[in-house]
Amino acid sequence: MTASKPASPPKLRSRAWFDDPANADMTALYLERYMNFGLTLQELQSGKPIIGIAQTGSDLSPCNRHHIVLAERLREGIREAGGIAIEFPVHPIQETGKRPTAGLDRNLAYLGLVEVLFGYPLDGVVLTIGCDKTTPACLMAAATVNIPAIALSVGPMLNGWYKGARTGSGTIVWRARELLAAGKIDYQGFIKLVASSAPSTGYCNTMGTATTMNSLTEALGMSLPASAAIPAPYRDRQECAYLTGKQIVEMVAVDRKPSDILTRDAFINAIRVNSAIGGSTNAPIHLNALARHIGVELSIDDWQKFGLDIPLLVNLQPAGEYLGEDYYRAGGVPAIVSELMKQGLIVENALTVNGKTIGENCRDASIADEAVIRPFNEPLKKRAGFTVLSGNLFDSAIMKTSVISEEFRARYLSNPNDPDAFEGRAIVFDGPEDYHKRIDDPSLGIDESTLMFMRGAGPIGYPGAAEVVNMRPPAYLITAGVHHLPCIGDGRQSGTSGSPSILNASPEAAAGGGLALLKSGDRVRIDLRRGEANILISKEELETRRKALEAAGGYPIPASQTPWQEIQRATVGQAETGAVLENATKYQKLAQTIGVP
Ligand code: FES
Ligand code: MG
């Protein structure tokens, strides 16, 4: 359906602040201070919509810093379409800068933005998205408040190069780590190699969580068509900022809100696009969180149901070879949506920010370079979605099937009688610090048949959930040619990692999940076809261990270091259901009121 203009435009929220004769003294107070930097009374009382620019860029957030520049074109678009722009900062989230983990700050930025959108005279908002957690934080807040909102991606960095080969963000770190562990490069060489992957402004140029979430934002209909993949420094990105500014003003005029766009159909489209692009294992956490804040039913099983059988079409690192510039030139999100549409795999009438459906936006798109985006019938992998596992280790965890390498398949999934299952001896690490301390200790006896476990790394245990489940094997195994051991845990992993880990386990050890009962030396069996993950011990032994753990006061959680860590731990849910602040989900459609009790 295409939204039509309502007969009379909706009354603007901002009028309750700036033009309310019945409340003259408050109106005067609101007006005088917004005039003190040069906005005129005429502008503020003109009836023009006030458009917020939720600015996520700053010196602390290099991935999104280019939004400071883009905001100029954004303002010009807003102004030209008849709006008034008011820019304000969002709590910074730099994936590679924040300790203990940027994951902790998604819900904090969300909370902050909800308060701003609810409590200030804003009629619509441009969400400046980019680096991993900035995208879900902004979308989640817009969903809770439900004022007209459009996302503007900052775009990926240019491709990185080193000695004639593409070096991709994050992905090169995992590679460089192996080279360092094997003694092939030194400390300085390590840093030089990693830095080569970041040649310009923008976010990670790989198909990490940033490219994933910006692509899915477009697939959900929350940003302009063909906008997600434009590299940050390209002139097209500036044009896109201008057009985004114009679009939000029209959205306010017709009252097109997140709830009109973020329907279950939109989420199903996004799940399918996520498989086709080889998207990050963080996507289910963020999209499930977004669905909860907008009030749409979406479960972890929906990811397997709608996504598992979708083929991998995008040949980007870490699952493939290319990087962000190539992705854009090959056609970006519309080319992928169009391929899926031809197979009937897109709900075409899902509405998008420009008032058209995703079908209308993408029907005529095509692939410009089949080396980078494959046609549906010539995919890189036939099934590229997430397998959902459960058992006595956890109720749910996911595995990204698109990154299962030939090496991994040959070593673990090649038993002709049992091709989708493997079994091994567990070595358990309690948090990343424990892992770093002990991984190269030969007395652990880690060999090719070891399954490495990471626990204490979930939303409560390592507040925010650390990206640490993809663990490199000990140096002596890498030297011997073993690059990946199966890794399983209650933490997350970077979208830039090519490891087929089993992760986001829920409930986590710190919330009483079965991982807390596991001991090094236990045999564990993983069956991908059946979706099972079990410690091979008796029910009685499991019960005995549970009682002992309870008697000891449960799985030990390190003390909170900041007030926010303590607040988040008290209210955060598990990865499976989005790791949201549970008591926040009851607050929905806040923009229906004007911020007074
Ligand atoms: Fe910001 Fe990857 S670190 S996008
Ligand atoms: Mg990350």
Image (tube, grey):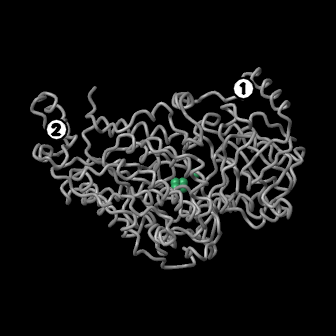
Q: Depth check: 78 or 510 in front?
A: 510
> Count of labels shown?
2
Q: Position of residue 572 (x, y in %)?
A: 55, 33
Task: Look at label 2 and name its amino acid.
Answer: Phe
Q: Residue 28's quadrant in the figure?
A: top left
Badge 1 crowding class, 10 Å Cα cut-off, few under 14, some 14 to 19, many 20 or more, is some
- Indicate left or right for 373 with 67 as reference: right
- Indicate left or right for 60 with 7 as reference: right
Q: Quadrant of the C terminus?
A: top left
Is the residue marked 2 within 8 Å of ligand 1, measured from its CB?
A: no
Q: Secondary structure at mark 1?
A: loop
Q: Depth check: 449 or 526 in front?
A: 526
Q: Position of residue 432 (x, y in %)?
A: 70, 42
Q: Secondary structure at mark 2?
A: helix
Q: Measuring 44% from the left and 50% from the top, which residue is drawn there?
A: 59
Q: Position of residue 310 (x, y in %)?
A: 59, 64
Is 456 drawn above or below residue 275 in the view shown?
above
The residue that mark 1 highlights is 554
